Each structure stands twice: as structure tokens, then as C-alpha cells.
Amino acid sequence: MQCELCGATVPGPGKRVRIEGADLVVCMACARYGTEVQQPRTGPRRYAPGASAASSPVPARRRRDLFDQLVGELVDDYGERIRAARLAKGLTTKELALSIKERELLLKRIEKGDLVPEDEVRAKIEKALGIRLLDAPEESIDRDRREQQRLSTTLGDVLSFKKGTKP
């Protein structure tokens, strides 16, 4: 193997150093020009105290991301729909804000279309005004909500109970 800095033959594995941002394998003479870079250990794995070496690692759960939580798409004219429903109920923005416990400025910006409402705020507005702001069929929304609530199998999902008398 050759030194990547001076070109001399390196006896043994050489030293890995960082010189001017570049990681190089160099001879012992050139190693003084850089800082040593720690190499990852390739030896046997060490476990934390108390952990048994025979136990296999637990597979990691897949993290849920934002796209798993999407139920439908927000309609394009959400601001106009909110404003029309609010006026139809005879409410001011301040009264609506108080009823859903949000800031009046937030509702004004949502109505103008400057701000896209978060799911929690959207749900509060839909409930207070009795409107739909999502662009998905009702049955698919209900099905998706049930699936989101049920994250894992429970014991009750597996067992079936028989009613009968004990002997």
C-alpha cells in the first residue's frame, strides 16, 4: 500500500488522518501533518450491562409520517365556505373564535385564504359550523379514522369468547 500524501510504501495498515478536510491513509512520517480520524470498530459487538447476548434485537416499529394521517384533501375554496357558513349562522369572527377557543386573527387569516388550517382547527370549525372542508367521501373518512385509531392488535381482537356454563 502507498502513502496517499508522499507516495512512499506503507508497511502495515497505515494511519487514517484528516488533512485540509480530506481523509487520507498515510505513512507514519506524514501522519504528523493531520489529525487522526477514528476508524469504526469491526470487532465483536459489545452489549450494555445487563443485556443478554442471546436475545435478538427487537425490530423497530415503522414510524408514522404525515401521509399516514391524511384523510382527504382540503377543498380549494375553504375560506369562502367558512365565511359563508359563519354568516349563515349569524356569527362574527370573534364569536366563532370564542366558541372554538381559537384566536380571531387566526380565523380571519383562514377565511382570507392566507393560512391553511391545521387538522385540529379544521375539525373544530367543521363541527361548529356544520360544514365539510375535506374533499373525500364520508365513508372513506370514517374508515380511515377507525384504522388510525387501531394501531395494533389487542388480546380482544384475537380471542373469541363463548358463553356457556362452567362444569
Image: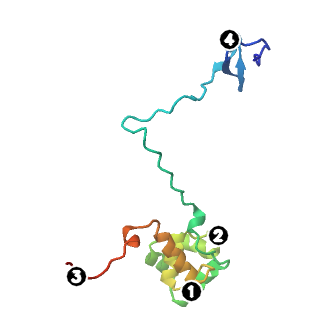
Q: Closer to the camera, 38 or 9?
A: 9
Label 3 sits on residue: 165
The quadrant the N terminus occupies is top right
Q: Closer to the camera, 138 or 60?
A: 60
Image coordinates for residue 103, horizontal then vertical, percent: 49, 70
Image coordinates for residue 69, horizontal then vertical, percent: 56, 67
Q: Dot 3, how many residues are within 10 Å of its Cα: few (below 14), some (14-19), or many (20+)?
A: few
Label 4 sits on residue: 28
Closer to the N terminus: mark 4 or mark 2?
A: 4
- Observer-side mark, 4 or 1, equals 4
Closer to the N terminus: mark 4 or mark 1?
A: 4
Q: Which mark is residue 114?
A: 2
Alpha carbon separation for disc pair 3 and 4: 84 Å
Identity of the residue drawn at 58% across and 63% down:
66
**Disc 2 marks which amino acid?**
Asp
Closer to the N terminus: mark 3 or mark 2?
A: 2
**Residue lying at the far right of the rendered structure:** 7
Q: Dot 4, how many residues are within 10 Å of its Cα: few (below 14), some (14-19), or many (20+)?
A: some
Alpha carbon separation for disc pair 2 and 1: 18 Å
**Disc 1 marks which amino acid?**
Ala
